[in-house]
């Protein structure tokens, strides 16, 4: 007999309670083994003011505390330390990470190469394609903002102005060019510039030479050329990304910066951090980023998340019995149902109508954001602008 909603909810709650109790027990064990966290027999004496200490200063009896304290420095330095630890650990597993996919911070790769883990073999840095294309969006937004401070209005309702939805579309073209035209930096650069020149084209001065030719082209001009029109009036210049003559020179500078051959050469492999971000979102669902989590919680959360990310509910079903939380047949059945639902939703999300809905939703959000920004008298935050 299938469990009722109330019963399954109770079972889920009892599993969560058991896990919380287990985590509390682990934490309690850690605390009890740490003399600095339990009341001292001489607690009636006035305690000395706390002095800053380093893990090296701690006595051997406080090894547990030292084990929990695994970073000493700023949050930014944490990423560098983490990367150095991972690269150092790779040799223990008899493998080499020779490529590094990052999002622009050169300090981490410099620190890894500085340690010469693989002798003369240098770890190369690849750009995350998603992050590179976000730079176009951030750069164009910053441009609108900085020019408005100089009383040059690039945004607004004028035809060909640089609006938020248009920036979104230009970003989308840039992303497609970087992902699709990755045979060489020249091909990639040409595809990126094609979108720019397509956008600034007018009936009097069409600039579609770089746009792909043929009936299937995304460029209306090139599609029309196939039909051999008699004169230019048959071309309807109504680009959704049209940029007027006042805006174009400013946008050109941003494109020039983002078609740098060195930058594009790091995008040729078309790598993204999507898989990592996907795993991170599962970990954060166990240990929210905005709340403090102790080492035990992070370790347990990461362990369950990695299991679920790779094996679905089976991952957590292997974990719970291992820490003394037995599973019931109902828990297993609910997990399998959850997996099926997740796979069905993922399949639907990859279909064209769903993708189109997401694009429309994103454009609507950008329009709403632009209206709100205008109502507030200007942008208060620009991604990548600080
Ligand atoms: Zn064109």
Image (tube, helix red, strand yellow):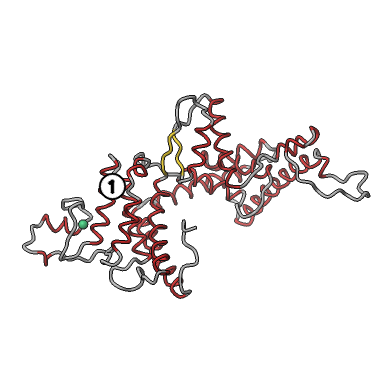
State the residue in front, 311 or 58.
58
Outermost residue toward the front? 150
Residue located at (67% from left, 48% from top) = 293
Q: Residues within 10 Å of mark 1 (few under 14, many from 20)?
A: many
The answer, for residue 314, to whether it is visible in the render is no
Please give left or right for residue 231 compared with residue 123 in the image: left
Give the total of numbered labels: 1
The answer, for residue 186, to whether it is visible in the render is yes
**Residue 323: % across, % down:** 68, 37
Please give left or right for residue 203 compared with residue 293 in the image: left
Residue located at (49% from left, 24% from top) = 119
Residue located at (52% from left, 40% from top) = 108
**Residue 311: % across, % down:** 52, 39
Please give left or right for residue 104 compared with residue 320 in the image: left
Residue at mark 1: 189
Residue located at (30% from left, 57% from top) = 252
Vertical position of residue 216 compared to residue 230: above or below: above
């Amino acid at each position: 007999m299938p469990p009722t909603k109330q019963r399954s909810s109770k079972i889920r709650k009892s599993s969560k309670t058991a896990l919380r109790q287990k985590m509390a027990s682990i934490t309690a064990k850690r605390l009890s083994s740490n003399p600095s966290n339990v009341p001292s027999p001489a607690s009636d004496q006035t305690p000395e003011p706390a002095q800053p200490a380093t893990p090296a200063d701690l006595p051997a009896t406080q090894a547990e505390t030292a084990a929990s304290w695994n970073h000493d420095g700023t949050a930014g330095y944490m990423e560098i330390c983490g990367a150095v630890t991972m690269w150092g650990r790779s040799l223990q597993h008899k493998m080499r990470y020779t490529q590094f996919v990052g999002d622009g911070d050169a300090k981490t790769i410099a620190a890894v190469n500085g340690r010469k883990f693989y002798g003369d073999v240098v770890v190369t840095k690849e750009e995350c394609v998603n992050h590179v294309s976000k730079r176009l969006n951030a750069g164009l937004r910053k441009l609108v903002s900085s020019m408005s401070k100089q009383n040059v209005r690039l945004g607004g309702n004028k035809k060909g102005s640089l609006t938020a939805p248009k920036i979104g579309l230009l970003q989308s073209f840039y992303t497609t060019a970087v992902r699709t035209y990755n045979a060489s930096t020249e091909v990639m650069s040409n595809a990126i510039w094609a979108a720019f020149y397509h956008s600034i084209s007018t009936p009097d001065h069409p600039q579609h030479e770089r746009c792909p030719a043929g009936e299937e082209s995304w460029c209306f001009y090139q599609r029309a050329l196939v039909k051999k029109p008699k004169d230019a009036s048959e071309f309807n210049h109504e680009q959704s990304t049209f940029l007027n003559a006042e805006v174009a020179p400013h946008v050109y500078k941003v494109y020039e910066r983002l078609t740098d051959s060195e930058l594009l050469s790091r995008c040729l492999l078309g790598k993204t951090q999507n898989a990592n971000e996907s795993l991170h979102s599962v970990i954060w669902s166990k240990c929210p980023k905005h709340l403090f989590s102790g080492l035990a919680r992070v370790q347990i959360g990461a362990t369950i998340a990695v299991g679920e990310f790779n094996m679905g509910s089976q991952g957590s079903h292997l974990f719970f019995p291992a820490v003394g939380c037995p599973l019931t047949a109902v828990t297993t059945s609910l997990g399998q149902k959850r997996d099926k639902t997740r796979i069905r939703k993922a399949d639907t999300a990859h279909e064209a109508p769903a993708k189109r809905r997401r694009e429309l939703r994103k454009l609507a959000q950008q329009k709403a954001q632009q209206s709100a920004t205008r109502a507030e008298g200007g942008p208060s935050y620009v991604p990548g602008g600080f």
